[in-house]
Amino acid sequence: MNNKLAMYGSVVATLLLAACNSDENNGDGESDKNDNYQTITLWFQDADGDGFGDPATTFTGDNPGAGWVTINNDCDDTPGTGSAINPNAVDVSDGVDNNCDGYIDGIGINYVVGAEGPATGIVFYITDDGLHGLEAAPADLNGSTGMAWGCKGLAITGADASGIGAGAQNTVDILAECNDAGTAAKLANAYLLNGYNDWFLPSFNELIQMYGQRNIVGGFSDSSYWSSTEDGKDSTYTFGANSGVAVTLKSVSRRARAIRSF
């Protein structure tokens, strides 16, 4: 069978061997009305059972039974693990092309500030002409109630970086040492949107960058927001329209907005 039949996205691949008419179509020198003709179906192995076949593993003929399909655009047909990777999957941030679109974690799109990001957050910062950047959740964590930063009296090892790109590691450091419940870092880390679960509490400079685009991102209060940048064992940097830059006790309640990188 000619492999050119394996066209991506085809529902049923068929080959008409000889047309049933009086013309000579198939090169045997005889009128095709004297030829036998048949339609051959091309099947693709679906080893992982997700309904999408491997374009490289084919069978021609009648239905071969379970484990074979006529849709051939799976990009990972590994039994067990491959079932979560197919064209209908959501592309989460895990270093894998989950939805077989040719891009890992949605990378490949040139985003602009104000656009909807890979996780359907709002892009507020870009690098590399929009291939990478930061997106903000569309709403504050815990609504208008706010939350404490937590662990007043405890200096968190490592959670003092303030630059762009530092928020994710700050959040990891906070979670490793602060066991208080319902903190800003814990709520950010637990945030889930459109299948993406890699959100974090922004560093101070990430917070400033996001707040500077608050009219584009939307949903912001004039109240202060937590950053993940610790000032010391008792306080952390915050920022808001009313207070500007402030060093705030970890035990008080402030708002927070989760972000993620792409």
Image (spheres, rainbow, N blue to C red):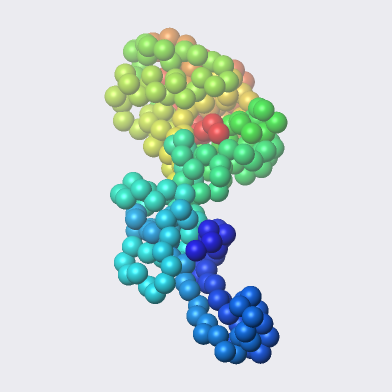
Residue at the (33%, 62%) spot, across then down: 67
- 10 relative position to 129: left or right: left
Residue at the (46%, 35%) spot, across then down: 95
Q: Position of residue 21 (x, y in %)?
A: 64, 88
221 versus 168 height, above or below: below
109 versus 87 height, above or below: above
Splitting the image into 4 quarters, where does residue 115 fall?
Answer: top right
Could you say which is closer to the camera, residue 199 or residue 38? 38
Q: Position of residue 251 (x, y in %)?
A: 39, 22
194 versus 191 height, above or below: below
Q: Position of residue 215 (x, y in %)?
A: 68, 37
Q: Residue lying farthest front?
A: 29
Residue at the (35%, 24%) spot, across then down: 175
- 73 relative position to 213: left or right: left
Splitting the image into 4 quarters, where does residue 53 fall?
Answer: bottom left
Could you say which is closer to the camera, residue 42 or residue 120? 42
Q: Quadrant of the C terminus?
A: top right
The reply to whether residue 143 is in sight is: no
Could you say which is closer to the camera, residue 161 or residue 23? 23
Q: Position of residue 57 (x, y in %)?
A: 42, 56
